[in-house]
């Protein structure tokens, strides 16, 4: 089935895609959003490949799901290993129809001036290069099956990244990778989409924003409705429903949609105001003192 043009809102397409019987590979699927997503896709009839850097978590998840589930240990930053994973999946199941590049990490809070360059490289190797490593070896198979790819970006791609810029930079780059892929696949019958989330209740969120004093202060800068949190299951369901309609973009919670659509104008003003804000300036100094 060839995709139709997106609707005027730019968030949905009118094509449909039934995941039943399809082979779906999800990275970072041993916990959080990825775990919830493979559970939903499996419930909807897909064969799921659970990929996680924690091999025992991947295999435990696959075991708990039962038939039509296969667990694989792999670090998405390892390009050779991801090539092997795709080859193994194709050999085992005859192909791959759906790929969701979900694995990601956050940096140690730091300004660009004070951060450890190794931490910048670590975040990029997983959040950006890891997405490429996941998607690239699968694309011939996705085109062959006229399947669908999802790249998990973030609403952080829209926002200023003081104190955590590697994450925002990586997610903005993933957005651009997804946009390019969507256009490049346009004539093939395969499709690609980008998923954006605000604050999701995961262990990563709790470690960064809740268990850390500076994280809580950064979180307090988010106004309503941007500070509304969603569950990992909500985020996963958004991705799964988007796959079912070959969505070019999905975003949750919905309060981020106006910002996403108007960010060009909003960010011009916002960056200027934040740079002059004494509360933000003190927060930046506190982050630098910690380093």
Image: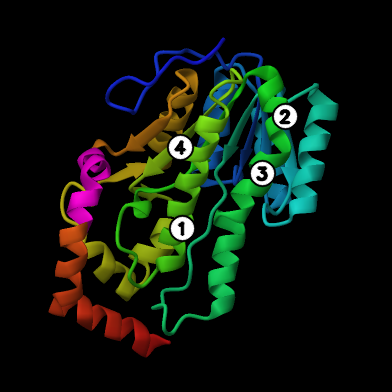
In-image side of 279 versus 180 (left or right): left
Using a 10 Å C-alpha cutoff, classify the residue at mark 4 as few (fewer than 14 neighbours), some (14 to 19) or many (20 or more): many
In-image side of 271 versus 141 (left or right): left
Secondary structure mostly seen in magenta is helix
Q: Earlier in the sequence, mark 4 or mark 2?
A: 2
- The residue beneath circle 1 is 204
Q: Which residues are magenta?
A: 255-267
- The residue beneath circle 3 is 134
> In percent of the image, x 76 and y 37: which residue is there?
86
Regarding mark 1 in the picture, which secondary structure is present there?
helix
Looking at the image, do the residues carrying marks 1 and 2 touch, with CB atoms under 8 Å apart?
no
In-image side of 144 versus 172 (left or right): right
Using a 10 Å C-alpha cutoff, classify the residue at mark 3 as few (fewer than 14 neighbours), some (14 to 19) or many (20 or more): many
Looking at the image, do the residues carrying marks 4 and 3 touch, with CB atoms under 8 Å apart?
no
In which quadrant of the rendered view does residue 271 lie? bottom left
* Residue 149 image point, x, y percent: 57, 31
Q: Earlier in the sequence, mark 3 or mark 1?
A: 3
Kindly tell me whether residue 89 is visible in this rendering: yes
Q: Which residue occupies the extreme right position in the image?
A: 91
- The residue beneath circle 4 is 194
Residue depth check, mark 3 versus mark 1: number of the one nearer the observer: 3
In-image side of 76 versus 281 (left or right): right
| Alpha-carbon span between mark 4 and mark 3 | 15 Å
> In percent of the image, x 29 and y 84: which residue is there?
286
Q: Earlier in the sequence, mark 1 or mark 2?
A: 2
| Alpha-carbon span between mark 3 and mark 1 | 21 Å
Near-viewer residue (277 or 92): 277
Residue 140 is marked as 2
* Residue 113 image point, x, y percent: 41, 83
């Amino acid at each position: 089935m060839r995709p139709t043009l997106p609707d005027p809102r730019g968030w949905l397409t009118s094509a449909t895609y039934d995941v039943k019987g399809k082979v779906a590979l999800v990275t970072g699927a041993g916990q959080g959003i990825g775990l919830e997503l493979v559970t939903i896709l499996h419930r909807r009839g897909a064969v799921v490949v659970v990929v996680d850097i924690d091999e025992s978590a991947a295999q435990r998840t696959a075991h708990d799901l039962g038939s039509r589930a296969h667990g694989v240990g792999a670090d998405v930053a390892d390009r050779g290993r991801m090539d092997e994973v795709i080859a193994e999946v194709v050999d085992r199941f005859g192909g791959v129809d759906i790929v969701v590049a979900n694995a990601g990490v956050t940096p140690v809070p730091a300004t660009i001036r004070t951060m450890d360059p190794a931490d910048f490289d670590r975040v990029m190797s997983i959040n950006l290069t890891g997405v490429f490593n996941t998607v690239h070896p699968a694309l011939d198979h996705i085109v062959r099956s006229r399947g669908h790819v999802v790249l998990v970006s973030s609403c952080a791609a829209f926002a200023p990244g003081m104190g955590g810029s590697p994450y925002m930079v990586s997610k903005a780059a993933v957005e651009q990778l997804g946009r390019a892929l969507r256009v490049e696949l346009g004539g093939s019958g395969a499709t690609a989409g980008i998923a954006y989330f605000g604050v999701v209740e995961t262990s990563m969120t709790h470690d960064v924003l809740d268990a850390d004093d500076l994280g809580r202060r950064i979180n307090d800068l988010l106004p309503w409705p941007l500070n509304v949190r969603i569950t990992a299951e909500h985020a996963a369901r958004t991705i799964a429903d988007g796959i079912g309609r070959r969505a070019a973009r999905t975003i949750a919670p919905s309060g981020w949609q106006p910002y996403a659509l108007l960010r060009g104008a909003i960010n011009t003003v916002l960056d200027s105001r934040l740079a002059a804000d004494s509360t933000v300036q003190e927060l930046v100094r506190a982050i630098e003192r910690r380093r």
